[in-house]
Amino acid sequence: MSTASQGKTIGIINSGGDCAGINTVIASAVIAGSRLGYKFVGFELGWEGLIDRKYQRIGVEEAGRIQNLGGTVLHTTNRGRFAAKVGQNETKVIDPAILQACKDSMEALDVDGLLVIGGDGTLSGAQQLADTGVNIVGIPKSIDNDLYATDHTFGFATAVQVAVDAIDKIQTTAFSHNRIFLVECMGRNAGWLSLYAGLAAGADAILLPEFPTSMEDIVAFLRHRRDNHRNSTIIVVSEAFEIDGKAVTVGSSATNEVIFAGISGELTRRVEQIAPNEFEMRSVVLGHTQRGGSPCAEDRILSKRFGTRAVEAYHRGLFGHMVALQGDKIVPVPIQDAVNQLKLVTKDNRIYEAARQTGIFLGDLDDYKDCAMPDDMTGMPYGFAPTQR
């Protein structure tokens, strides 16, 4: 046990959207940190709890009880006085008085520094606080997987699995009724969740915000499948996918973040306008089911790696850094490298390429026809084609 760390208290903050694995990160950090002599407090409702000095002490016993639970025992919010992002790549300068209030609370509670669990917005705020001299180590959390400096964020794998489980169920009812289903996934401005879920579930089309297409091409794709006796179709669409250059939204939140909602329903309506009565269509919005539940095995392991490595980075004095997965290693990277731009899907990505090569329509009709399966392959979920007469 290090004498330098003996008796020091580290605060833990999670902020922004919830996801599976937060409690696992908290538990692993507390267990590993306690072995080094640190004590821990968790601030409730993110930065708001730090400002208002609302917290709970977390020891090894408490950590053992929460390590596999979904959600977060600290609760969370994506609203409040500390919001640092107002949109894609738009950073808000936090009021210096709010930053000082955070520092005052830490001094009053004798908190040496912070482990900050969050995504793009949370870590953007953490960077501003770190710039004032606060000891901070970041941990990447997001079902969107859009933080630039890490291969994966925790919470992503579980969200993908939830979506895949849902699409598997939708496949059978789509086949039974010869229907087209549009399945809307979360992900904000990045299409990773839709891409991974669509590929894993064997979707017929994946529509991503990074690759806009026309309604005419979408209808042509559906007609191509119908004309080749593929009577049911699964289209996975990211919530931020744009029609005619515009996303479907329901206004803004209290933090001025755009709220995406309704793209699957709007696509259904637009197809019906172009091709009235040609297709029987349904839309399904997976919504917050993708955030809920206990973490899958992959996320439990990644969360424990992140939590333990974050404490190690803190112990080594690597403040202003975030732990990141790069290849098979967890490495420290400057927080700024993670939040200065979003990680978006590109056509040279290996997962995108696998989707393209397996004949999934990704928005480019010509490319889809080049890669489409032969006409005698139906791709039906039960592995057989209907008798042709």
Image (cartoon, helix red, strand yellow):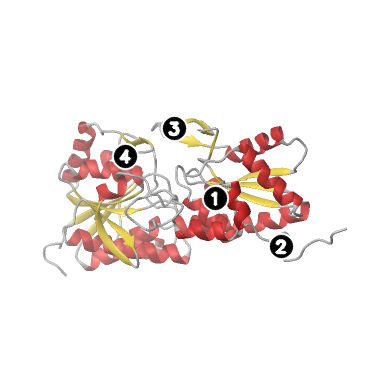
> Which amino acid type is marked by label 4?
Glu
Q: Nearer the viewer, residue 33 or 175?
A: 175
Q: Which residue is mark 1?
A: 289
Q: Which residue is mark 3?
A: 253
Which mark is first along the chain, 3 or 1?
A: 3
Is 260 positioned to the left or the right of 83 in the image?
right
**Label 1 near label 2: C-beta < 8 Å?**
no
The residue depicted at 67 percent of the width and 54 percent of the height is 170
Which of label 4 and label 2 is nearer to you? 2
Q: Which residue is mark 4?
A: 48
**Label 3 near label 4: C-beta < 8 Å?**
no
The image quarter containing residue 106 is top left
Whether 111 is drawn above or below 254: the answer is below
Whether 193 is drawn above or below 49: the answer is below
The image quarter containing residue 360 is bottom right
Q: Which residue is mark 2?
A: 377
Which quarter of the image is occupied by the N terminus? bottom left
Q: CA distance from mark 1 to mark 4?
A: 26 Å
Q: CA distance from mark 2 to mark 3?
A: 46 Å
> Which amino acid type is marked by label 2?
Met
Which mark is first along the chain, 3 or 2?
A: 3
Q: Secondary structure at mark 4?
A: helix
Which of label 2 and label 1 is nearer to you? 2
Instruction: Characterize the local packing of mark 3: few (<14), some (14-19) or many (20 or more) Cα atoms within 10 angstroms.
Output: few
Q: Secondary structure at mark 3?
A: loop
Q: Secondary structure at mark 1?
A: helix
> Which amino acid type is marked by label 1?
Thr
Which mark is first along the chain, 1 or 2?
A: 1
